[in-house]
Amino acid sequence: MAFTEAEKQEYEAVLTAFIEIRRPREEIRKKLDFGFQIKDQSIEIFEIRPVWDDDSRIMHSPVAKATFVRSQRHWKVFWMRADLTWHSYPPKPTVRRIHHFLELVDKDTHHCFWG
């Protein structure tokens, strides 16, 4: 089941604030920026940058993902491995609140999200 409109608005506000803090200076954003998307029960954070050999094409590189499990009232935390599939984040596979997910991504103590 997808998020309610109220939940979606809350998560958009929280994610927008999180991304805004991490974004590079305005003059750099054509080469590197950050974004997010909310789809169904998941939130994904990604890098935005030009394709390495064609500046006219833009690519999104996944950074982190959280999926809300409503029946268990927690978020599953994922990171993108080199095999280009999402894997559970072993140090903390679930969190109770979206803020806790963003704290994990921000601190990235195991260098899984930002490299």
Image (spheres, rainbow, N blue to C red):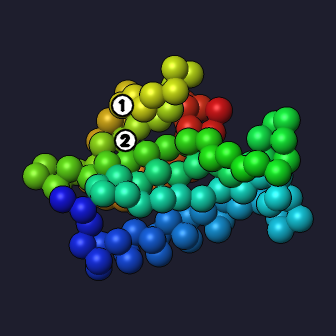
Horizontal placement of 16 versus 101: left or right? right
Sequence-first tag of 2 and 1? 2
Q: How many marks?
A: 2
Q: Specify the label residue 75 is tagged with.
A: none
**Rendered residue at 35%/53% (across/down):** 42
Question: Tags 2 and 1 in contact by the CB under 8 Å rule?
Answer: yes
Mark 2 residue crowding within 10 angstroms, few (<14) / some (14–19) / many (20+): many
**Rendered residue at 77%/41% (across/down):** 51
Horizontal placement of 40 versus 89: left or right? left
Callout 1: helix, strand or loop? strand
Q: Which residue is mark 1?
A: 88
Which percent across, then down, holds residue 92?
36, 36
**Rendered residue at 72%/56% (across/down):** 33
Callout 2: helix, strand or loop? strand
Q: Eyeballing the image, is 114 above or below 35?
A: above
Q: CA distance from mark 2 to mark 1?
A: 6 Å
Question: Is residue 87 among what the camera can see?
Answer: yes
Which percent across, then down, holds residue 94?
29, 42
Which percent across, then down, holds residue 103?
48, 52
Instruction: Say which amino acid is labelled 2.
Output: Val
Q: Eyeballing the image, is 82 above or below 2?
A: above
Quadrant in the picture for residue 39 = bottom left
**Rendered residue at 71%/61% (across/down):** 23
Residue most extreme to the top: 83
Horizontal placement of 38 versus 27: left or right? left
Placement of the N terminus among the 4 image quadrants: bottom left
Question: Is residue 103 among what the camera can see?
Answer: no
Instruction: Say which amino acid is labelled 1.
Output: Ser
Q: Which residue is mark 2?
A: 77
Quadrant in the picture for residue 88 = top left
Mark 1 residue crowding within 10 angstroms, few (<14) / some (14–19) / many (20+): some
Placement of the C terminus among the 4 image quadrants: top right
